Image (tube, rainbow, N blue to C red):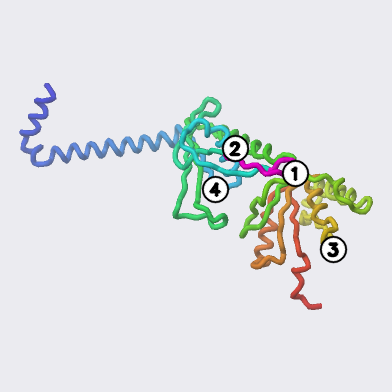
Amino acid sequence: MPLSEIVSGLSTNPYFGAGFGLFGIGAAAAILRRGSQGALILFRRHMMITLEVPCRDKSYQWLLQWITVRGAKETQHLSVETSFIQKETGQIRTKYDFIPSIGKHLMRYKGIWIQVERTREQQTLDLHMGVPWESVTLTAFGRNKQLYFDILEEARLLALEATEGKTLMYTAMGSEWRQFGHPRRRRPLSSVVLEKGVAERIVTDCKEFIGNSQWYIDRGIPYRRGYLLYGPPGCGKSSFITALAGELEYGICLLNLSERGLTDDRLNHLLNVAPEQSIILLEDVDAAFVSREM
């Protein structure tokens, strides 16, 4: 029967005209819509793999840098990220990197298409960094989690290349450590003038301590090592710490004990969440005892 005759028959049908037919068509459309939504959810759940990286995670900046290198070339919707690079001569050069802007983008990695979605919640702030909350979500076909392990590891190695041969500086911001300033070129121990044998003795002791962590674990002793450097300003204390960090390939965490608002709880928290492979430099140690009486 031709479609025109079917439509004509429905229009003259009293039950259809009373609304039962329209109700049936609407109900059928709703069922189809819900069915398609359910099928899409099942498909995404069982046939696609998703990774969400929030801005508070350590790998977030690594991933953004990796996307800058691998993904920015394949999209025309960009946002700029300005950074400064210090040359060997000390001259500062401005660098502009283009990263995919807020929204959805497509990129290809090892023959697999990946959807990259950057989201930003203007109403939600990261209380520690004071910026809107962001996250990056990667979505790809398949169920192999190794894909994302490879991406994160590649992003980590890329970030390490940028700081290779340099010393990272951190400062306490609230209850967390944040990178401070530009990565500094490692300073050689030979550039610091100390009494004969002092630098070598401290470096040897540090390396022995680093290589014997299990000894402390087996005996339940806190795995810590402290050195008290004293002397008038300009005698080389900070210079030696910078050179020591470079020799050990460690970072430096700057913490001023005279800082306003530094409570015992916050100090204890900062000491326990310090970045791995870092020296915690406690400045103005004498300021911690000004209120004590003998």
Along the viewing direction, whichever of 135 and 44 lies nearer the viewer:
135
Disc 3 and disc 4: Cα gap in Å?
42 Å
Counting every numbered tag in the picture gives 4
Q: On screen, 212 above or below 66?
A: below
The quadrant of the picture occupied by the C terminus is bottom right
- Give the residue type that dot 4 points to: Cys
Along the viewing direction, whichever of 26 and 71 lies nearer the viewer:
71
Q: Nearer the viewer, mark 2 or mark 3?
A: 3
Residue 49, x across and y down, in percent? 49, 35
What residue did someone put label 3 on?
232
Crowding near pointer 3: few (<14 within 10 Å), some, many (20+)?
Answer: few
Residue 187, x across and y down, in percent? 80, 46
- Give the residue type that dot 3 points to: Pro
Residue lying at the far top of the rendered structure: 1
Q: Is mark 1 on a helix, strand or loop?
A: strand
CB under 8 Å between discs 1 and 4 = no
Q: Which of marks 3 and 1 is nearer the N terminus?
A: 1
Range shown magenta: 86-96
Q: What element carries label 3?
A: loop
- Give the residue type that dot 1 points to: Arg
Disc 1 and disc 4: Cα gap in Å?
28 Å
Crowding near pointer 4: few (<14 within 10 Å), some, many (20+)?
Answer: some
Q: Which of marks 1 and 4 is in front?
A: 1
Disc 3 and disc 1: Cα gap in Å?
26 Å
What residue did someone put label 1 on?
185
Q: Earlier in the sequence, mark 1 or mark 4?
A: 4
Q: Which of marks 2 and 4 is in front?
A: 4
Q: Which of marks 1 and 2 is nearer the N terminus?
A: 2
Disc 2 and disc 4: Cα gap in Å?
14 Å
